């Protein structure tokens, strides 16, 4: 444990009401969106300025006390799980949009700004910030940068990294760096690209320059119901083969539909076992032409029903059902684990059949909601944590799903990151040399291993897996696990 | 100079890197200044071909030495393309060279540059290890994003052997408008208006040594006609006639002479005004403003103009990189943070690859 003098040095940086050490105050920070893990930190620092963050990181460097930066704590991979004997740096008060430049379509924000606040600020100028993780109404951009968050529009628009133009950060060495800026082009290696997705292992981001995109003039959203999941998958393949580039392509299976019906009274065509949502966007003339093509492609796939949204309200209703599916599953089961794997799109059908087989073998129900456009699966494994061994069985199924994603040429995470949850699977994806080179890069940024230690790399001080049920905000349907 | 190393397989690539104390990777040599450094030359010319191409996945994997024009043909057969328009395709540029140089062309305006389409890489680090980072699927958050990092890395951190890219369906038709601008201020106004418009242009490019803009629209033919006529009622201009794509001179940098010194200068749109005003006043210098004012290209014909160009960049806080010609690699480079040397050392512990500053 660090000495009292060391802790006092950290505490002295902030006023006493912004350095929490009382057990009751710390308990709120013990866990994040991955509620199966819980660790009590030594203290929680609540800085209000970038200079305070820099001073905290430098004091951690000098005293060897590890730190974990945290935004809203929505990480689904346990990325912001505290480190025992370390502090949490709560970034929520660095929440100012420093500059919004509609002319050059750029926003400069502090890391505690909430994802949707950027689009809200940009909307009056006809602009938006594209990445839309499902927790976007609460997750912070600092967390989005740390984990390279995704969303429902990644095939066309990419992930967080594709929208970060510049960064200012304090590294674990105490060095403050600035890379990139408002321009779209740069020289030399892509430092912003390397930093985005660092999972908190390099340091703490202080300022983020984001690109804003013009909001599409026109959207056309179609919901198609199918008798089988496979038919829905085939429809996706047909849309892609036709050369269309929809903004979003999403599938929900029967169990997910049942949940959405129960939770938000979403209406789906009777008799369908799977629903496909396709959204086209662009100038009205382009959408008018493409919607005709889309509808003939979908009709050829023999859907039970096809429902184009006739207005903005109907479009919102379709998305509400989709975005609520995860918390809705909470109504079907006391607990669930959401997995985040990627398979090549052409192997979606095979992946889903194998997931169904795992469900049968384990006796655990699995709902599937996924970003079909980019092959990003989100199987929800339902279990009852009150039954002894149920969590372990669910974890085992989750692990098998990740392994099948790797085997099929995909990835163990599309958008949640490795964090604590998947670090034992890192070696399924990377050879020892490949893990080593990443450790070397990490050591360049953080030679003492004080920035979010115990994450991403396997076998480093595993916290106990315990069962704590749904995140309170998840129960209320504020945040969603995907 | 001895003949370059010429590995034929990725295993041979790793072996070649281990075989010499100083390694300089070269592709087709279309951007010669980037590899004009002392060391044993390692050519990727033997590492060619598509390894995997899955049109329905929107992805392909190819060896680093594959000429981009071969890839463009293979993609076009399946109605796909690399939307970021890597430059110098006709000149013979290779895929690995495109990644290492980090250069993108006019198409980067709509969906982003080369760094936005790279998904995975196999490369050899300074310890001579063949490593695979990133992945082969369009969405992936596992591990540090080394593939992105290597975009623009100029062979200073590793030698690229194989790359996986995301591709998009090629729009069914395209057309180019030329919009008139009397001066760079008016050009900036048009750039900004288009940036927030409903038109979703593919490219917004300055005409070389001129204030007019080329605006390229892509999509279904009937939609383009309507969009084009609306744009031309808002901004004076014309529709470029003929089947040739006028932007081809920009992709090939053929508006400049091969003997010129070519310098890439990242800009923000507001800098584009001074960039054009000042460069237009210099003798023996041509220039172009691209990607909606995000990048400037300078082509220096007469070396007497070099000090004036350097002075211009310094005054406006702009940095430059020489792609071709006999000039220092970096122009007006800002001080490098310590972490950049530390990461260089992490990937290249025995200084096998060229230093960052030359």
Image: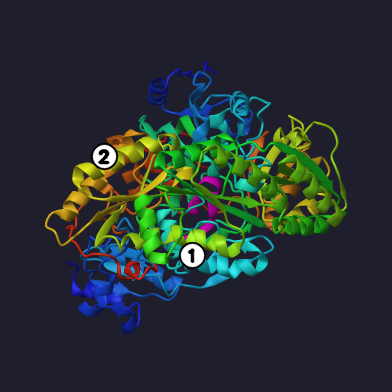
Visual colour scheme:
rainbow
Q: Secondary structure at mark 1?
A: helix
Is-magenta flag for residue A86?
A: no
Q: Which residues are magenta?
A: A155-172
Tag nearer the camera, 1 or 2: 2
Q: Residue B91: name its quadrant.
A: top right
Query: What residue sits right under mark 2 in the picture?
Result: A357
Residue B77 position, x and y percent, is: 61, 25
What residue is shown at x 34% (from left), y 80% (from top)? Answer: A18
Q: Residue A212: name its quadrant.
A: bottom right
Q: Quadrant of the C terminus of chain A?
A: bottom left
Q: Residue furthest front?
A: A270
Query: What residue sits right under mark 1 in the picture?
Result: A115
Q: Is residue B127 above or below residue A467?
A: above
Residue A383 position, x and y percent, is: 22, 56
Q: Quadrant of the N terminus of chain A?
A: bottom left
Residue A436 can be seen in this image: no
Q: Residue A45: name its quadrant.
A: bottom left
Q: Is residue A50 above or below residue B252?
A: below
What residue is shown at x 44% (from left), y 65% (from top)? Answer: A140
Q: Is residue A460 left or right of residue A77?
A: left
Q: Nearer the viewer, residue B140 or A276?
A: A276
Marks 1 and 2, how far apart at CA: 37 Å
Q: Secondary structure at mark 2?
A: helix
């Amino acid at each position: 444990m660090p000495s009292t003098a060391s802790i006092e040095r950290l505490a002295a940086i902030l006023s006493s009401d912004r350095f929490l050490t009382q057990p009751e105050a710390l308990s709120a920070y013990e866990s994040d969106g991955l509620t199966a893990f819980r660790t009590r930190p030594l203290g929680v620092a609540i800085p209000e300025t970038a200079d305070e963050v820099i001073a905290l990181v430098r004091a951690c460097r000098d005293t060897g006390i590890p730190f974990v930066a945290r935004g809203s704590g929505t990480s689904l991979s346990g990325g912001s799980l505290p480190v025992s004997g370390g502090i949490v740096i709560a970034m929520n008060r660095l929440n100012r949009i420093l500059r919004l430049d509609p002319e050059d379509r750029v926003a400069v924000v502090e890391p505690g700004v909430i994802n949707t606040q950027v689009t809200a600020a940009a909307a009056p100028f006809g602009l938006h910030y594209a990445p839309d993780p499902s927790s976007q109404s609460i997750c912070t951009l600092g967390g989005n940068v740390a984990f390279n968050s995704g969303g429902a529009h990644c095939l066309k628009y990419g992930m967080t990294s594709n929208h970060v133009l510049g960064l200012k950060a304090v590294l674990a060495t105490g060095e403050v760096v600035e890379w990139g800026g408002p321009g779209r082009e740069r020289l030399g290696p892509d430092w912003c690209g390397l930093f985005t997705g660092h999972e908190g292992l390099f340091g703490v981001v202080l300022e983020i320059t984001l690109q804003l995109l013009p909001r599409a003039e026109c959207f056309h959203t179609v919901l198609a119901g199918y008798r089988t999941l496979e038919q829905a998958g085939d429809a996706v393949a047909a849309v892609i083969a036709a050369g269309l580039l929809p903004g979003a392509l999403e599938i929900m299976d029967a169990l997910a539909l049942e949940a959405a019906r129960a939770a938000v009274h979403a209406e789906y065509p009777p008799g369908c076992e799977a629903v496909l949502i396709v959204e086209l966007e662009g100038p009205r003339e382009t959408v008018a032409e493409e919607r005709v093509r889309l509808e003939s492609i979908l009709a050829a796939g023999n859907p039970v029903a096809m429902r184009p949204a006739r207005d903005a309200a109907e479009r919102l209703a379709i998305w509400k059902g989709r975005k609520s599916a995860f918390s809705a599953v909470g109504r079907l089961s006391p607990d669930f684990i959401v997995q985040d794997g990627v398979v090549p799109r052409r192997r979606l059908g095979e992946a889903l059949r194998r997931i169904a087989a795992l469900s049968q073998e384990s006796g655990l129900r699995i709902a599937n909601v996924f970003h079909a456009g980019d092959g990003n699966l989100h199987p929800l494994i339902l279990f009852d944590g009150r039954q002894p061994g149920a969590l372990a069985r669910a974890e085992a199924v989750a692990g098998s799903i990740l392994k099948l994603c790797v085997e099929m040429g995909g990835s163990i995470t599309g958008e949640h990151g490795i964090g604590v949850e998947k670090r034992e699977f890192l070696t399924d994806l990377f050879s020892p040399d490949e893990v080593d080179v990443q450790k070397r890069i990490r050591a360049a940024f953080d030679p003492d291993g004080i920035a979010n230690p115990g994450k991403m790399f396997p076998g480093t001080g595993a916290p106990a897996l315990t069962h704590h049920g749904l995140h309170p905000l998840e129960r209320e349907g504020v945040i969603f696990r995907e | 100079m001895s003949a370059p190393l010429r590995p034929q397989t990725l295993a041979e690539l790793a072996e070649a890197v281990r075989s010499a104390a100083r390694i300089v990777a070269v592709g087709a040599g279309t951007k010669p200044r980037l590899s004009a450094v002392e060391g044993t030359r390692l050519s990727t010319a033997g590492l060619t071909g598509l390894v995997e191409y899955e049109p329905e996945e929107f992805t392909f994997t190819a060896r680093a030495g594959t000429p981009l024009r071969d890839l463009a043909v293979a993609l076009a057969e399946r109605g796909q393309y690399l939307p970021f328009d890597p430059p110098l395709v006709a000149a013979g540029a290779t895929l690995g060279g495109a990644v290492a140089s980090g250069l993108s062309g006019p198409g980067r305006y709509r969906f982003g540059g080369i760094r936005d389409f790279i998904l995975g890489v196999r490369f050899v680090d300074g310890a001579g290890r063949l490593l695979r980072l990133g992945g082969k699927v369009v969405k992936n958050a596992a591990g540090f994003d080394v593939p992105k990092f290597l975009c623009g890395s100029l062979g200073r951190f590793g030698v690229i052997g194989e790359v996986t890219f995301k591709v998009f369906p090629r729009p069914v038709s395209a057309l180019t408008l030329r919009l008139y601008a009397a001066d760079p201020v008016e050009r900036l106004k048009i750039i900004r208006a288009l940036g927030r418009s409903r038109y979703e242009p593919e490219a917004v490019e300055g005409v070389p040594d001129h204030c007019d803009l080329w605006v390229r629209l892509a999509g279904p033919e009937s939609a383009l006609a309507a969009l084009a006529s609306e744009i031309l009622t808002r901004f004076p201009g014309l529709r470029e006639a003929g089947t040739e794509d006028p932007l081809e001179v920009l992709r090939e940098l053929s508006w400049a002479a091969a003997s010129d010194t070519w310098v890439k200068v990242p800009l923000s749109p507001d800098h584009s005004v001074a960039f054009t005003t000042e460069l237009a006043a210099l003798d023996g210098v041509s220039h172009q403003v691209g990607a909606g004012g995000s990048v400037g290209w300078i082509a220096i014909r007469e070396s007497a103009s070099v000090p004036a160009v350097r002075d211009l960049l310094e005054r406006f806080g702009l940095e430059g990189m020489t792609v071709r010609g006999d000039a220092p690699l970096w122009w007006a480079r800002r001080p490098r943070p310590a972490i950049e040397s530390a990461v260089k050392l992490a990937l290249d512990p025995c200084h096998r690859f060229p230093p960052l500053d030359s």
